[in-house]
Amino acid sequence: MTTHPFAAWRLLCARVGTLAAVMLLTACATTQRPAQPGETVWSGRLALQVDSTPAQSFSAAFDLRGAPSAGELQFTSPLGNTLATVTWTPGSAELRQGGQITRRGSLDELTAELSGAAVPVTALFGWLRGEQGDVPGWQADLSRQAEGRITARRSAPLPTAELRVVFQP
């Protein structure tokens, strides 16, 4: 039985295409930097739903490190690609997304502009530790914190929002 000359060519192209796709995905994947001595690091999945018009929702893996006063929050896709990185220090906050950089005077100002509701990232450090904290307009449900699950709801000011976090306790 003879093989059609194009069959071997198609097989070779398919193998080269598969190899190229694997190499591309590997090149796009990012690795989390190791924790520095004394640095708090939390990782897991985060979902935010804002009841605006139109409704907004966001979900990604996260890596949170640092402290409420200065830190970094990195969002990654299921394939490990960095979607965005937020860094903050006293008096400034920065979002890096692809080649774009957005800077604002505070983390609350930056998250409010991006999602329509200030997201209490600094309070998230306490919530992850099981500390209720007082965040005006937000009510955190920490009843499942020991299982690695937190839900926080924003009722005021509008728009309402819900933040769900799943993490390794």
Image (spheres, rainbow, N blue to C red):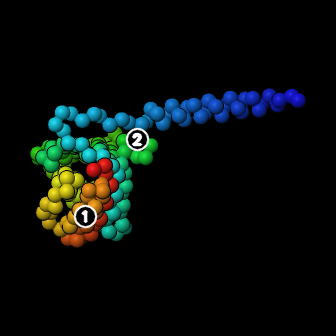
Q: Which mark is residue 60?
A: none
Residue situated in front as seen by the camera: 130 or 89: 130
Look at the image and tell me in which quarter the N terminus lies.
top right
Residue 67: image x %, image y %? Answer: 16, 45
Residue 13: image x %, image y %? Answer: 66, 31
Q: Give the Cα distance between marks 1 and 2.
A: 32 Å
Tag 1 and tag 2, C-beta contact below 8 Å: no
Q: Residue at x 28, y 33 (%)?
A: 34
Can you tell which quarter of the image residue 36 is in?
top left
Q: Secondary structure at mark 2?
A: loop
Mark positioned earlier in the residue sequence (1 or 2): 2
Residue 85: image x %, image y %? Answer: 29, 43
Q: Residue at x 31, y 49 (%)?
A: 168
- In-image side of 123 versus 97 (left or right): left
Residue that protrudes farthest toward the front in the picture: 146
Q: Is residue 86 above or below residue 157?
A: above
Q: Mark 1, mark 2: which one is toward the viewer?
A: 1
Q: Residue at x 31, y 51 (%)?
A: 167
Residue that protrudes farthest toward the left in the picture: 90
Residue situated in front as seen by the camera: 28 or 143: 143
User: How many labels were placed on the picture?
Assistant: 2
The reply to whether residue 48 is visible in this rendering is: yes
The reply to whether residue 115 is visible in this rendering is: no
Q: Which residue is mark 1?
A: 143
Residue 96: image x %, image y %? Answer: 29, 42
Q: Which residue is mark 2?
A: 81
Q: Residue at x 77, y 31 (%)?
A: 6
Residue that protrudes farthest toward the right in the picture: 1
- In-image side of 125 versus 62 (left or right): left
Q: Name the amino acid type tagged 1.
A: Ser
Q: Secondary structure at mark 1?
A: loop
